[in-house]
Amino acid sequence: MTNRLSLAMPSKGRLREPSWSLLEASGVAPQEPGERVLQTYCRNADIDLLFVRADDVPEYVQDGVVDCGITGRDLVAEGNYDVEVLLNLGFGYCSLQVAVPTESTFTSLKDLDGLRIATSHPTIAQRALDEAGITAELISVGGSVEIAPRLGLAEGIIDLVSTGSTLRTNGLRSIETIFESEAVVIGRRGATASQNRNTLVTMLQSVIEARKSRYLLFNVPTKYLAEVVAELPTAGSPSVLTLADSDVVSVHALVPASDIWALMPKLEAKGASAILTLPIERMVR
């Protein structure tokens, strides 16, 4: 009987480096594997790592080969795997989009009713067709889906899109999004959650939450304190510390990183000075 947690990670591709970086930031100290090593461990945590294709991670988790894994939400949905999403990781964003040749007059998925659609995600595509109440011939393509319309194979495609540059390069334009995806941590549905699994999810989530926020410090004249506090986009009350100069106080607050740009000029307009914004390593709410 072992209490060690087994975690499957992408061995390559766009999810590998962000996954590895997130593990390191969470403090579990994974042992760097060699170029061909498929297994390793974490130096300061009871976690064993298995490196496999992202496509295979859901299968390994579903079958109980590993306790949990990191993969794309689209891969879970496409394979109809019986797993549970434990945590959204905030990277690897992409979406399944319906695209057609730029010169076509189609504006939505319903315009492709009765026509042919090429895709490498037939399960998700069929679900979208059923929900839209339309019938189309799905043509499964293993790769280079974007070329299908030019070859006369299909009138439209359903494919994963990150930036849209590949669509534009191939003379296509998106007309509808049918599925949003990102990297996720998954576990076997119905499995008893171990302490190690709960701790791993908590530590990963603490890093994800911290990356969204900044620790903000500044001094402000006491007479403007109420107005400044009203401007702060904080969930709770900020900390206010008295200084040697009784006319000035120091304000400490946790704010969304995305709000810093708009907040700075408002603080300066109220006489705020010595403004500092600091990154946060981990944050457990």
Image (spheres, rainbow, N blue to C red):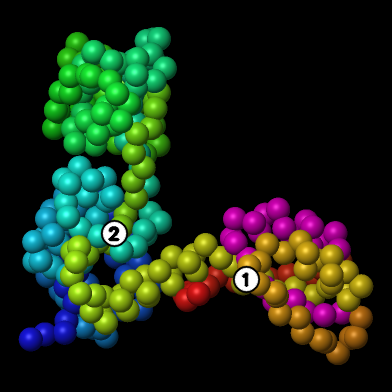
Rendering quarter of residue 62: bottom left
Q: Residue 117, image x and y in percent? A: 23, 21
In the displayed structure, would residue 267 be above or below residue 142? below
Q: Which residue is mark 2?
A: 85
Marks 2 and 1, Cα distance to the nearest angstrom? 28 Å
Residue type at mark 2: give it: Val
268 is within the stretch colored magenta:
yes
Residue at 38% x, 32% y is 177
Q: Residue 228, image x and y in percent? A: 80, 66
Q: Mark number for residue 193?
A: none
The residue carrying pointer 2 sits among few (fewer than 14), some (14 to 19) or many (20 or more) residues within 10 Å by Cα, namely some
Q: Mark number for residue 254?
A: 1
Residue at 36% x, 42% y is 180
Q: Residue 146, image x and y in percent? A: 26, 24
The residue carrying pointer 1 sits among few (fewer than 14), some (14 to 19) or many (20 or more) residues within 10 Å by Cα, namely many
Rendering quarter of residue 153: top left
Q: Secondary structure at mark 2?
A: strand
Q: Nearer the viewer, residue 8 or 112?
A: 112
In the displayed structure, would residue 95 be above or below residue 190? above
Q: Which residues are magenta?
A: 248-270
Q: Give whichever of discs 2 and 1 has the lower sequence position.
A: 2
Residue type at mark 1: give it: Leu
Residue at 17% x, 23% y is 138
Q: Secondary structure at mark 1?
A: strand
Q: Residue 225, image x and y in percent? A: 84, 72
Which quadrant of the rendered structure holds the N terminus? bottom left
Residue at 13% x, 32% y is 142
